[in-house]
Image: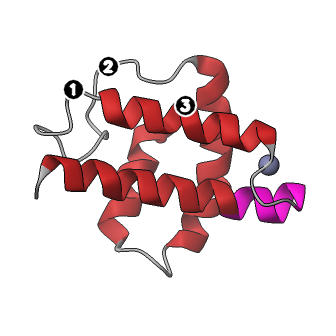
Amino acid sequence: MDINLKKDKEKKIVKEMILLYCKKKHKKNLCNECNEVLQYAYKRITNCPFTKEKTFCSNCKSPCYNSKMKEKIKTIMKFSGPRMLFYHPILVIKHLFLNFKK
Ligand SMILES: [Zn+2]
């Protein structure tokens, strides 16, 4: 798969997850707090130097997310992840999950 395509796909899924989370938890369509998380995740995906070698971020050694953001994203993943399975290929979700499971 093309590397930019891969990154785009990751971004799309992260965005949908955060949107879903915000809608259900905050009753908003992307509040400031969630938007911050989204922008952070975008930046990480864009700058990730490992996209090419790995199956997404699951085996990534780079400490992409600082702990505060990581906690937030982890919470969002936990909440939205299972719900996203209906809309996206399981492998993509699996990657995102593995990335934050550790
Ligand atoms: Zn929110």
Q: Does the stretch in magenta take in 22? A: yes
Disc tally is 3
SS under mark 2: loop
> Marks 1 and 2: in contact by CB < 8 Å?
yes
Q: 50 left or right of 73?
A: left
The residue identified by callout 2 is: 62
SS for tag 1?
loop
Upstream in sequence: badge 3 or badge 1 = 3
Disc number for residue 49: 1
Question: Which residue in the structure is indicated by mark 3?
Answer: 40
Marks 2, 1: nearer the viewer: 1
Viewer can see residue 28: yes
Q: Residue at x 72, y 43 (%)?
A: 34
Instruction: Look at the image and say whether residue 3 sits in the magenta stretch.
Output: no
Q: How many angstroms separate mark 2 from mark 1 (CA)?
A: 9 Å
In which quarter of the view is residue 69 placed?
top right
Q: Which residue is more in the foreground, 61 or 51?
A: 51
- Which numbered disc flags the more N-terminal residue, 2 or 3? 3
State which region is magenta: 20-27
Quadrant, the N terminus: bottom left
